[in-house]
């Protein structure tokens, strides 16, 4: 007797752990941004230990009540270790309860990504290399996007929608416009490319040539304009289009607002880093004095960095959901073709 094919089933434990991982990565990126803002990357000169101690055994009173750069750097390491442990848990649960073989290997890739990310962070300390720090800052948001994708693809909504497409019931959502799928995908790619250029700009030193600095600034602003344009178009198509589900149009509207907030934070970041030359427009702002590593200055800069990663994460959610609805439409079309072919043969 032939065994029936295994149907993907929803695992509450797997999905909740994926959500916890995604939530945990955001403060990891925020604290990582503080490490760069405060130049705290070498606050702990050894790795993987901390001043000769096991990282987890390092006295809490020493780093909690010690210098701020030590607090930031050690907290970043502990949060990174937490992300690694959560990834290990995902791999274990996925290989025990998950029927989708590709998803099992996806969790392994997620674990490999966090290991590589940790290795880059360690290499930055051991080699004291600024370029590695820049790469580390670019791959962190990529891992955040992978964690977000894991939470989406392990959700009850994702799995049950696929099952509905197989049954082809009347309640199955209709496929959305393919243009929206393409635009949502381009939005996710553009958001990540814009972050890469921003990371380059953030790690430039005073020795860089003025022309190169100008080129990075113009590229960063151009990509920011592209992200804003795509976010507005995706939001408009989602809210005005037919058959677009709430799981797509709600986050698309939120993303458009988040991009506007990010632009405001970008302007604030420029002011706290370089001030403004427009004395004729506003004398009070023109006479603003830059305070290196000041509280509000650091908060604005780090918020700009973290919000960029949040935009990538949310754009991945929208892109994946549009892909899922598009695949439902393809599945329905294939089922109808098979039914019509069988009827014609009969």
Image: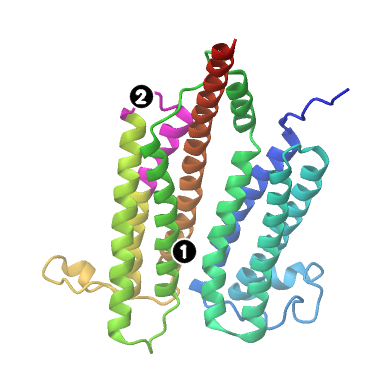
**Helix, strand or loop for disc 2:** loop
Magenta highlight on residue 243? yes
- Outermost residue toward the left? 280
Q: Of callouts 1 and 2, which one flags the residue occurring earlier in the amino acid sequence?
A: 2
Q: Is residue 96 above or below residue 136?
A: above
Q: Can residue 16 be seen in this view?
A: yes
Q: Please, what secondary structure does the residue beneath circle 1 have?
A: helix
The residue positioned 73% from the left and 52% from the top of the image is: 86
User: On residue 188, which mark appears?
Assistant: none
Please identify the quadrant where the C terminus is shown.
Answer: top right
Within-10-Å neighbours for mark 2: few <14, some 14–19, many 20+: few
Q: In this view, does 148 lie above or below 165?
A: below
The quadrant holding residue 85 is bottom right
| Residue bearing mark 2 | 242
The mark lying in front, picked from 1 and 2, is 2
Instruction: Say which of 322 and 254 sits in front.
Output: 322
Q: In which quarter of the image is the N terminus?
A: top right
4 vs 151, left or right, is right
Q: What stretch is highlighted in magenta?
A: 240-258
Question: Could you give the CA–CA distance between mark 1 and mark 2, rounded to whole angstroms?
Answer: 39 Å
The disc at residue 302 is 1
Label 1 crowding class (10 Å Cα cut-off): few <14, some 14-19, many 20+? Answer: many
Is residue 43 among the parts visible in the rendering? no
Check the image and report above or below for 78 versus 100: below
Q: Position of residue 156 (x, y in %)?
A: 64, 30
Return the residue found at the far right. Answer: 1
The colour scheme applied to this rendered structure is: rainbow
Residue at 68 percent across and 50 percent down: it is 106
Residue lying farthest to the top in this orientation: 346
């Amino acid at each position: 007797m032939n065994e029936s094919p295994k149907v993907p089933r929803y695992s509450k434990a797997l999905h909740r752990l994926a959500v916890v991982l995604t939530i945990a990565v955001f403060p990891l990126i925020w604290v990582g941004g503080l490490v760069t803002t405060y130049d705290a990357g070498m606050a702990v000169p050894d790795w993987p230990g901390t001043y000769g101690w096991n990282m987890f055994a390092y006295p809490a009173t020493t780093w909690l009540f010690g210098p701020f750069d030590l607090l930031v750097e050690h907290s970043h390491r502990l949060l990174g270790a937490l992300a690694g442990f959560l990834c290990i848990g995902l791999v274990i649960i996925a290989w025990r309860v998950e029927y989708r073989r590709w998803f099992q290997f996806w969790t392994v890739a997620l674990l490999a990504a966090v290991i590589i990310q940790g290795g880059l962070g360690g290499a930055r300390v051991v080699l004291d290399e600024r370029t590695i720090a820049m790469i580390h800052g670019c791959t962190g948001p990529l891992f955040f996007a992978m964690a977000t994708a894991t939470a989406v693809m392990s959700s009850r909504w994702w799995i049950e929608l696929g099952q509905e497409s197989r049954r082809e019931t009347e309640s199955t959502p209709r496929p959305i416009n393919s243009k929206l799928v393409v635009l949502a995908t381009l939005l996710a790619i553009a958001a990540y490319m814009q972050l890469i250029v921003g990371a380059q700009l953030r790690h430039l030193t005073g020795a860089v040539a003025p022309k190169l600095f100008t080129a990075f600034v113009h590229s960063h602003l151009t990509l920011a304009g592209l992200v804003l344009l795509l976010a507005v178009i995706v939001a408009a198509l989602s809210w005005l289009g037919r058959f677009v589900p709430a799981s797509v149009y709600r986050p698309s509207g939120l993303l458009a607002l988040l991009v506007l907030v990010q632009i405001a934070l970008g302007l604030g970041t420029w002011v706290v880093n370089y001030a403004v030359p427009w004395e004729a427009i506003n004398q009070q702002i023109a006479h603003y004095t830059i305070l290196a590593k000041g509280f509000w200055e650091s908060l604005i800069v780090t918020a700009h960095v973290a919000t960029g990663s949040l935009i990538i994460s949310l754009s991945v959610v929208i892109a994946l959901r549009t892909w899922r609805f598009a695949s439902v439409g393809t599945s329905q079309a294939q089922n109808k073709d098979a039914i019509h072919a069988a009827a014609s043969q009969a």
